[in-house]
Image: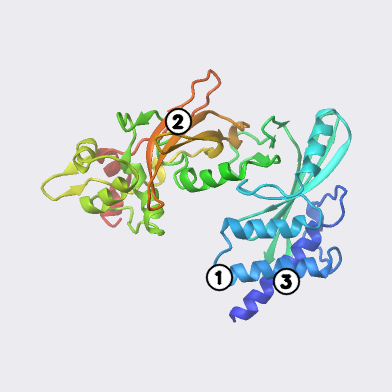
């Protein structure tokens, strides 16, 4: 059965590539051709398709589909055929970026020009995005391919004139779909990094910042240092740092209201130079039971808006052995490749581990710092989640 599944998935990816990489001109796909079938060997040399299938099946069998290295191999495979390709999260450099750079430069000048790129999704789908520009207006058409039953078919097709678009100095193509008021479907904002990011900056971002991010915590949203932790909420960091430390998710349910002091402190103290007694003074703590009054964030304790992601753009190796990472918050929802900038300093330890030393927000009148959603108090938790504990 497993072999059959792998065979079917392999055929899907060959099919996806054939359709997605057909030709260099703009090829719009409309709703009335959903489900149109194509021959698997119609567009790409068989050796390219087989190499791509080999990469995917090896990754699937090793459960490494989500790994950055796997996406880099897949992008390189597609890129070797001469096409622009990148992952949807902008966590690998685009292959053949000159294709999209030339398109954006000509589009900015008002020329009539077209191009397309391929995005690799985490789910295993590939997305083809066709762009056509004329008189500084941008048309966007997207086609995603996935399984419908046991047959590969066009899963979705979307086309629109961008309500806003820009090619930034940093090398981002930003574009926005005009959505009606009250619309609650997928967001209409996209940010695609075209110009390559320094590989060391990318590696630092993936290691030190991406596991934390901006959602559900204020670690990079507020000013703090080892001398003064300010408004930093350590409770927010228990879950992401637990996963960072142990390589697995913290196994707790929504009705968890307390955690043993040893468990939480082992995690926090691993990544911060903060004494346990100071931590117990800062956060709600029951000295009789030796437990922190910690609860898992629920649905109502998260922002409903899309959040930025951190991108390290420069770094400094300090004389005291610390490393300072200059970071931009890339916020697609606000059409910003730099919503604000901040400096995160980490202390590198001998065993390959590290500690977070400080976060400094670089002052600017143009800063757009996302609002932090604070954790519920005990009273607020009872109001919104009390029924969970009662089994209702």
Q: Which residue, given by chain and number where applicable, does mark 2 sit on?
A: 371
Q: Which residue, given by chain and number where applicable, does mark 3 sit on?
A: 11
Q: Quadrant of the N terminus?
A: bottom right
Return the disc, 1 or 2, that comes first in the chain's sequence.
1
> What kind of element bears circle 3?
helix
Which marked residue is nearer to the observer: mark 3 or mark 1? 1
- Which residue sits at x=76%, y=49%? 84
Residue 339: where, in percent of width, then height?
56, 29
Mark 3 touching mark 2, by CB under 8 A? no
Q: Quadrant of the C terminus?
A: bottom left
Vertical position of residue 361 compared to residue 160: above or below: above
Return the disc, 3 or 2, that comes first in the chain's sequence.
3
Would residue 155 be visible to someone looking at this image?
A: no
- Which residue sits at x=70%, y=69%? 53
Place residue 223 in its image quadrant: top left
Place residue 37 in its image quadrant: bottom right
Residue 151: where, in percent of width, then height?
72, 70
Which marked residue is nearer to the observer: mark 1 or mark 2? 1
Most foreground residue, 61 or 291? 61
Q: Which residue, given by chain and number where applicable, does mark 1 sit on?
A: 62
Q: Which mark is residue 138?
A: none
- Which residue sits at x=30%, y=29%? 227
Q: Residue furthest top?
A: 365
Label 2 crowd bin: few (<14), some (14–19), many (20+), radius 10 Å: few
Would residue 13 be visible to someone looking at this image?
A: yes
Most foreground residue, 300 or 318? 318
Vertical position of residue 280 compared to residue 254: above or below: above
Residue 305: where, in percent of width, then height?
52, 37
Residue 68: where, in percent of width, then height?
58, 55
**How many angstroms separate mark 3 from mark 1 (CA)?**
19 Å
Mark 1 touching mark 2, by CB under 8 A? no
Vertical position of residue 299 compared to residue 230: above or below: below
């Amino acid at each position: 059965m497993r072999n059959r599944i792998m065979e079917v998935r392999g055929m899907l990816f060959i099919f996806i590539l054939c359709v997605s990489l057909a030709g260099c001109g703009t090829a719009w796909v409309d709703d009335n051709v959903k489900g149109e079938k194509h021959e698997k060997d119609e567009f790409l040399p068989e050796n390219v398709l087989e190499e791509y299938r080999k990469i995917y099946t090896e990754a699937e069998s090793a459960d490494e589909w989500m790994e950055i290295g796997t996406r880099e191999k897949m992008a390189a495979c597609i890129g070797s055929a001469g096409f622009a390709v990148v992952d949807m999260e902008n966590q690998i450099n685009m292959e053949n970026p000159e294709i999209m750079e030339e398109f954006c430069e000509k589009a900015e000048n008002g020329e009539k020009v077209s191009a397309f790129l391929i995005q690799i999704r985490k789910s295993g789908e590939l997305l083809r995005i066709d762009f056509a520009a004329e008189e500084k207006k941008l048309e966007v058409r997207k086609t995603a391919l996935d399984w419908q039953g046991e047959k590969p078919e066009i899963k979705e097709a979307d086309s629109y004139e961008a309500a806003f678009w820009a090619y930034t100095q940093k090398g981002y193509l930003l574009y926005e779909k005009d959505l009606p008021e009250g619309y609650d479907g997928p967001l209409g904002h996209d940010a695609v990094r075209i110009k390559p990011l320094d590989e060391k900056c990318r590696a630092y971002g993936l290691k030190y910042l991406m596991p934390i991010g901006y959602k559900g915590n204020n670690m990079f949203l507020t000013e703090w240092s080892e001398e003064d932790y300010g408004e930093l909420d350590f409770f927010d960091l228990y879950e992401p740092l637990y996963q960072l430390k142990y390589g697995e998710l913290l196994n707790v349910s929504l009705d968890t209201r307390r955690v043993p002091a040893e468990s939480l402190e082992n995690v926090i103290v691993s990544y911060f130079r903060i004494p346990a007694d100071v931590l117990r003074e800062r956060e709600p703590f029951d000295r009789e039971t030796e437990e922190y009054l910690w609860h898992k964030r629920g649905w109502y304790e998260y922002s409903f808006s899309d959040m930025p992601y951190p991108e390290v753009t420069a770094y400094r190796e300090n004389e005291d052995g610390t490393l300072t990472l200059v970071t931009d918050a890339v916020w697609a929802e606000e059409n910003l490749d730099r919503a604000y900038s901040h400096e995160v300093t980490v202390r590198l330890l001998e065993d390959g581990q590290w500690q977070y030393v400080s976060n400094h927000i670089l002052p600017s009148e143009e800063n757009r710092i996302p609002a932090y959603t604070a954790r519920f108090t005990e009273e607020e938790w009872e109001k919104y989640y009390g029924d969970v504990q009662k089994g209702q």
